[in-house]
Image (cartoon, helix red, strand yellow):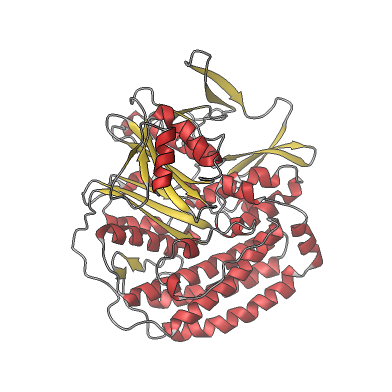
Amino acid sequence: MENLKEKIQAIAPSAVFEENTQVLTVDVDKNELHQLAENLKNDESLAFDYLQDIIGLDLGDALGVNYRLFSTKNNNQALVVKTKTDDRENPTLHSVSNLWQSANLYEREVYDFLGIKFIGHPDLRRLFLRPDWKGFPLRKDYDIESNPVTLKNESVEEFEGSEKLELDSNGHIKESNFQLFDDKDYVVSFGPQHPSTHGVLQLRVSLNGETVKHIDPNFGYIHRGIEKMCESYTYPKILHLCERLDYLSAAINRHGFCLCVEKALELEVPERAVYVRTIFDELTRIASHLLGWASMANDMGAITAFIYGMRDREKIMDIFEETAGGRLFTNYSVIGGLMQDIHPNFQKRVKEFIPYMRKMLKEYHTLFTNNPIAKQRMLSAGWLKIDDAISYGVTGPSGRASNWHNDIRKIEPYAAYNKVNFNEITRENGGSFDRYMVRLDEILESLSIIEQLIDNIPDGDYKAKTKPIIKLPEGEFYQRVENARGDFNIYINSKGDKTPYRVKFRSPSETLVSALEPTVKGEKIADLIMIGGSLDYVIPCIDR
């Protein structure tokens, strides 16, 4: 750690290290940011190759950005680099999109909500809000009344170009327009209502004959301003919003937010709740992977496989409903533990499900995996190399299919994951078939985790006592959990009030969609839907 501090100080003399933080945190001058980032990324002794997130903040007199970095080659060492703009009127920072591919969308998101312009970014458009949106919603002085968005059906012109900021020879900012597609490109639109985009997503695809040249994802059709809503909600009320991000990982996301708040409060959760939460998380993972398998098979024309997957997923929904009352949204984890104790039938029904699911997995492989037509099609397209997976931030099963060991349950164990034995499923080739197989193999591992816990649920309380009004201490708090699509991170900035100053959710699905570009480029348009299905993204998690 001291060696890392010395290297950072040598590169950025202005660096100031913060005390009493969860992870090593350093503040640097904006003019030293890019040089530091370049060294952190390219120096083999540092090798911070994974940019997990870029978090934009309103600091009052200026606007700030937190860069959350990890070194996959150095035991996933974590580092937070902070910087801020000089003023609010013309806030600029140097782009790091030339270092990490994931920064492309992250910086567009910060620009969209806070108005920070990133010099050198190749395609600085709004990401979620429409092109004629006025103002930047995550600024504290934002006036919603200044907005042109109403319930009227006014038309919005198609926005082809984008702003590109560069420095001239004198170091002054110059602006130019960037054309997304060439005039001769043949562009087709998938979505936003296409059934196989797995949500309200538009993909504009340029083609050379039947071969994909470029993909431009267009987000925001179901943007709900959840992070802005969090600023006026108390912590218990935010829980239901977490479930409505990746709705197929609802219980895991809600659990993650509870963990972040409990960490900030230094609140000890009863062991009974810890075990039950973990079991719910793994049942949620299985249910998500079943729907992902069923949907991908359906996209490829296998309707029977879709029916089988939905049939077996329904058994998990029934277990959830009996204990928690909810099915898709269980509303079960609360700050301090569980909403109520488990149903008397819970353990019995879960233990009956485990052998049933193992038997059905064999049937899935007979029905679809070993079908020569389906298998050959999956084996022939959709390659993602490990370096690209890390650069684009493709975590979860899709990243592990490229042989990237990124399972948060192994890297930063939480809940009861340090009490069970399970394997991190990885494959080496990074193709569509590898992503398909990782999810099915992970179902087996989830069943094993549940089997180790279900008969060992401790007796005792299911919820710790908490104050009627929950206030977090002043500070910044992070929590990572492994949801069904990968690294889901919660960031809370507290000023000591009953509502947070800033909440940021890291969407694993956002980076999955961005990875369509390297994965599909050069493939046939007919394989686009299959490859997208193998990535298994969920759009509401992106739009937030």
Q: Residue 194, can we see it?
A: no
- Seen from the viewer's position, the closer of residues 145 and 3 is 3
Q: Position of residue 192 (x, y in %)?
A: 58, 44
Q: Is residue 9 above or below residue 388?
A: above
User: In the shown orientation, is residue 115 left or right of residue 476?
Assistant: right
User: In the shown orientation, is residue 74 left or right of residue 148?
Assistant: right
User: In the shown orientation, is residue 236 left or right of residue 312?
Assistant: left
Q: Residue furthest top?
A: 170
Q: Position of residue 338 (x, y in %)?
A: 32, 71
The quarter holding residue 362 reads bottom right
Q: Is residue 32 above or below residue 348?
A: above
Q: Is residue 206 above or below residue 160?
A: below
- Seen from the viewer's position, the closer of residues 24 and 206 is 24
Question: Residue at point 26% right, 65% down?
Answer: 267
The quarter holding residue 25 reads top left
Question: Total label count?
Answer: 0
Q: Position of residue 316 (x, y in %)?
A: 50, 74
Question: Residue at point 50% right, 31% down?
Answer: 95
Q: Residue furthest left?
A: 468
Q: Position of residue 519 (x, y in %)?
A: 68, 47
Question: Residue at point 36% right, 69% down?
Answer: 332
Q: Residue 429, can we see it?
A: yes
